[in-house]
Amino acid sequence: MENSNRIPTHVAIIMDGNGRWAKSLGKERYEGHIEGVDSVRECIKAARRNGVKYLTLYAFSTENWGRPIEEVNALMELFCKSVMAETPQLVEQGVRVVMIGRRDRFSDKVRSHLDKIESATAAGEHLTLVLAFDYSSRDEITTAVKSIASKVASGEMSVDDICEQTITRSLYTADIPDPDFIIRTSGECRLSNFLLWQASYAEMYFPTTMWPDFKQEEFDKALEVYAQRERRYGKL
Ligand code: IPE
Ligand code: IPE
Ligand code: MG
């Protein structure tokens, strides 16, 4: 038995409810996404202040390409604008940004912003901010299986060499520890293709707060919930 009465090393958040938040206030869905950027800023601060070392944010799933083109374009534009606006503060706070997900489907503009934020923040040592952008877990696992299979086919690796570690090391998250705590806002209780392999022993929390209302106080409250959890990993 391991008492988890401490700060999680890695918190991962499915930021959900932007559209419903906006609708409930008679606003456009897009305005919910804009307010959501404010919550991102707040949660980065709260994570850093609490000594969390890794914060993963699910920002755009591979399935989100299926939304109306206007919303997809607005989200891409918001990503670029936020990168420009937030990078100096991230550098100042010692936050290193790492992107996980596919990179082949973005416009050149989005891809260049993605490269820019990663290289500008590479020296950050206080917090690693992992942005899951065009990410889905099944896509990630499929890519990993292909890379392992090609190593076996070329003779670089034998089938008997494949172990759990091989798979873990072949994912986008190869250098990132598994999440200790997964939060999904808005009251939906599902993972929506997020970190399926990595979530094996994560504690889960589903507050009903919509993402635009999830500020530092809510983040702190979530850490209190985590502190009450008892992690057993199958043991007694
Ligand atoms: C989360 O909010 C943001 C993204 C998925 C990009 P939603 O846009 O899913 O908001 P709801 O769930 O429709 O309220
Ligand atoms: C999950 O939210 C993806 C992100 C938060 C980026 P969705 O709103 O897209 O998920 P579903 O469709 O409700 O499962
Ligand atoms: Mg949603």
Image (spheres, helix red, strand yellow):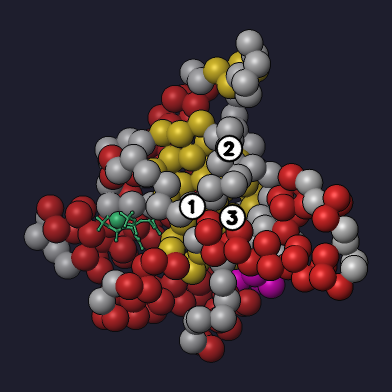
> In the rendering, at what x and y percent does residue 144 appear?
67, 62
- Circles 1 and 2, Cβ within 8 Å, touching? The answer is no
In front of the other: label 3 or label 2? 2
Task: Name the mark on residue 194.
Answer: 1
* Residue located farthest toward the right when viewing the structure as drawn: 156
Which residue has dot 2 on it?
200
Q: Is residue 37 visible?
A: yes
Q: Position of residue 196 (x, y in %)?
A: 53, 47
Q: From mark 1 to mark 2, how far is it between C-alphas?
A: 12 Å
Residue at the limit of the structure toward the top, as seen here: 236
Dot 1 beta carbon under 8 Å from ligand 2: yes
Secondary structure of the residue carrying tag 1 is: loop
Task: Label 2, secondary structure: give it.
Answer: loop
Which quadrant of the rendered structure holds the N terminus? top right
**C-alpha gap between disc 3 and disc 2:** 21 Å
- The quadrant holding residue 19 is bottom left
Q: Are marks 1 and 3 in contact (CB under 8 Å)?
A: no
Which residue in the rendered view is the most extreme toward the bottom?
Answer: 108
Write the residue at 40% across / 52% down. Answer: 192
Q: Amino acid at mark 3?
A: Leu
Q: Residues within 10 Å of mark 2 (few under 14, many from 20)?
A: few
Q: Which residue is mark 3?
A: 129
Residue at 28%, 52% (x, y): give it: 17
Span colored in magenta:
117-121
| Side (left or right) of 169 relative to 189 | right
| Residue 163 in the image, given as x and y percentages of width and height | 78, 46
Q: CA distance from mark 1 to mark 3?
A: 16 Å
| Residue 185 part of the magenta-drawn span | no
**Residue at left offset 41%, top offset 76%:** 76
Looking at the image, tell me whether mark 3 or mark 2 is earlier in sequence order: 3
- Of badges 1 and 3, nearer the viewer stands 1
Q: As displayed, is residue 141 above or below residue 189?
A: below
